[in-house]
Amino acid sequence: MASIKPLILSHYHLPLSSSSSSFTIQKPTHSLSLSPRLLNRPIQFQSKTISSPRIHLLPQPLHVYVTGPASDPNIADTDPKLDGLRQEDSPTPRVVTWELLSTLLMKHKFRLAVCVGSLLACTTCTLSMPIFSGRFFEVLIGVRPEPLWSLLSKMGVLYALEPIFTVIFVINMNIVWEKVMSALRAQIFGRLLIQKVEFFDKYKVGEITGLLTSDLGSLKNIVGENVSRDRGFRALSEVTGTIFILFTLSPQLAPILGVLMIAVSISIAVYKRSTLPVFQAHGLAQASISDCITETFSAIRTVRSFTGEKRQMFMFANQVLSFESSGIKLGTFKSINESLTRVAVYISLTALYCLGGSKVKAGQLSVGTMASFIGYTFTLTFAVQGLVNTFGDLRSSFAAVERINSVLSGVQVDDALAYGLERELKQKAVNDEHYKLFFSNSSDEKNLNSHLHYMSALKTSSNVFSVAWSGDICLEDVYFSYPLRPDVEILSGLNLRLKCGTVTALVGASGAGKSTIVQLLSRFYEPTRGCITVGGEDVRTFDKSEWARVVAIVNQEPVLFSVSVGENIAYGLPDDDVSKDDVIKAAKAANAHDFIISLPQGYDTLVGERGGLLSGGQRQRIAIARALLKNAPILILDEATSALDTVSERLVQDALNHLMKGRTTLVIAHRLSTVQNAYQIALCSDGRVAELGTHFELLAKKGQYASLVGTQRLAFE
Ligand SMILES: Nc1ncnc2c1ncn2[C@@H]1O[C@H](COP(=O)(O)OP(=O)(O)OP(=O)(O)O)[C@@H](O)[C@H]1O
């Protein structure tokens, strides 16, 4: 749950008015396709006295899904998912399906009906025009007894109506498709968020971004690029209508002319599409240029210090030259393509003049019909070419959808996370438009049901907070391999008890698996065998949203969001209303208040991308304030002070000592001097705890710990 609002907020700069007691979203500082309603919406950490309605979870017993003690009467022994939670049997189903698209479309039935009506109306207008042109010539040469003004007024009505119907069609079609795409984008984003962590090991951020931007963009273009005249549905209706009218006007001429026009137009359109790679290559060349510029100037200090200017110039020139050559090629193809459409029209017209002209001469065809045929020649030529282009767009959209589905169906949803998240969102979605976007189709119901089914094997009535504040944490015979490297066993039967309210230090050689233990305790991964318990309860009996609330982590490189200092601290409780006083209290306890108020805008100061405008020690203290605010009973410090200088380290260490008080804490540290006062020290080696005891007990053992201490030349004794 913690990830939803913050992800929205992370795109916003949220200055905190120092005079106010609440944080308000002011204005996005860079483009983002979010509803403008967000802009004026009070964000979640308002003063408690004027707090927005808080969502309380139903006090129902939790449904859980793992094995507990065999004697537990609530355990369904037969549940196939109970053993180990590997879920090999449940790959994620396809995400973008026809069913989903039609469900999303059907939410806009009325608008769709308007689209169909206006499409038929504007096509009828378009297709009537050549008929009226034909009549116009007949009136002019006196073979039609209709008054000229009467004919002209009818044509005027037609000319006026066609653009009106076109606007109605295009606007409504765009609205429907934009809404469908927003829902789809949100749902894919939501689906990505609940993937298991191994998904993020497998795919780079760029690839994931590509799914949501260029691939979905390609799907969006199906309508965006094809609502105009001569494309998409309009082209299809014009082609069908024109052929029908041609046959009605002249059954002898229509087959020859129709077939000829369609054949010429299709072959030209197909040729034009075959030049698409040239256009794409030009786009790629342009992208390479901007990559080169970004890389050069974002690493300008490195370029300077290695005198890399010449190399960068060479690289840039290389990109510019290939852009130039693709540009020249593109220009040539563009001009050929431009002329080819005319060639299609000229061939069709020539055929029409030859065949139609001879029929008019022989008195078998009226001049008016001949004039109408000329109009239809243009209509048909452009519409057929547009249709071929639309088919090409469809092909690339299908490929994009296939890519999205293949990425998302090859991996698995983290049911334990999805369950908690969906349960909470379903309640919030009732009142909040933003969350509704994530639940707008029947397949969500199915998903929720499947998560519920998955979670329903066991029940626990324990409150995760009370067991975490009072119980020990035990890693019991834990085996673990990373999903992407299943053959390499990182932990092999590790046992460790973290006594409630005390500090346990994990030490060991690099690669011994210390951070892996942290990942398991955080439940980013689940043990391959064995289990982790808290107060005797298997942690997997709690959904991951609940578990995330009881564990706070401070890393060596804490990640801050590009919002203000105040909001970064308030992120400790992303779903709650956090008062400014609470934020300041946490900052003071983390030794951060003094430096924060000396920043240009105090708590409103923006920290830059990933907190880049702050020093390492400052970032660290903000992360500690965030963890203090979270007030989680379990605390993990992963090399939290290792990157700091002595002064910063002392400040951070003081803050950490404050943070650790009364919490079950696991500390990872390479510098053994920082953990000598721990309640117990566990030395990891070969995937197990090889030595366990206090600093002095382990020294007395003269084992691996003692030699590590010796290596670090620590004069403790
Ligand atoms: N996401 C991952 N996928 C596959 N293997 C991984 C992953 N993360 C870590 N490993 C491997 O797991 C082993 C243990 O790594 P871990 O980070 O737990 O060690 P560590 O004791 O914390 O090391 P250090 O003290 O250097 O941080 C290493 O061999 C590492 O290559």
Image (cartoon, grey):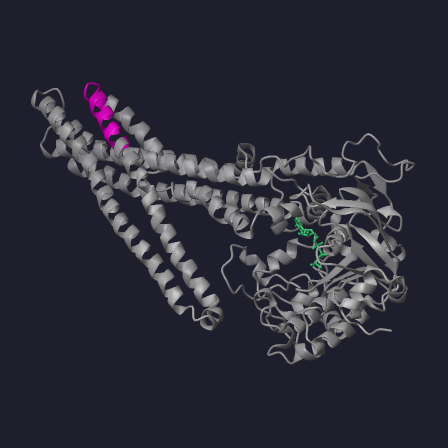
For residue 504, what is the image quadrant? Answer: bottom right
Residue furthest to the right: 71
How far from the left and from the top, in percent, is residue 454? 75, 36
Question: Quick check: can you spot residue 321?
Answer: yes
Q: Quadrant of residue 451?
A: top right
Q: Which residues are magenta?
A: 249-266
Q: State which quarter of the image contains the C terminus.
A: bottom right
Q: How many marks?
A: 0
Q: Is residue 194 visible?
A: no
Instruction: Please state the horizontal and vertical placement of residue 357, each as a whole percent of the image.
Output: 10, 26
Q: Is residue 254 magenta?
A: yes
**In the depicted view, which residue is nearer to us: 2 or 149?**
2
Q: Residue at x 63, y 71 (%)?
A: 16
Q: Is residue 121 left or right of residue 714?
A: left
Residue at horizontal 11%, vertical 35%? 140
Q: Determine the residue positioned at 57% across, 47% down.
A: 203
Front position in the image: 5 or 153: 5
Q: Main secondary structure of the magenta part?
A: helix
Q: 294 or 306: nearer the eye?
A: 306
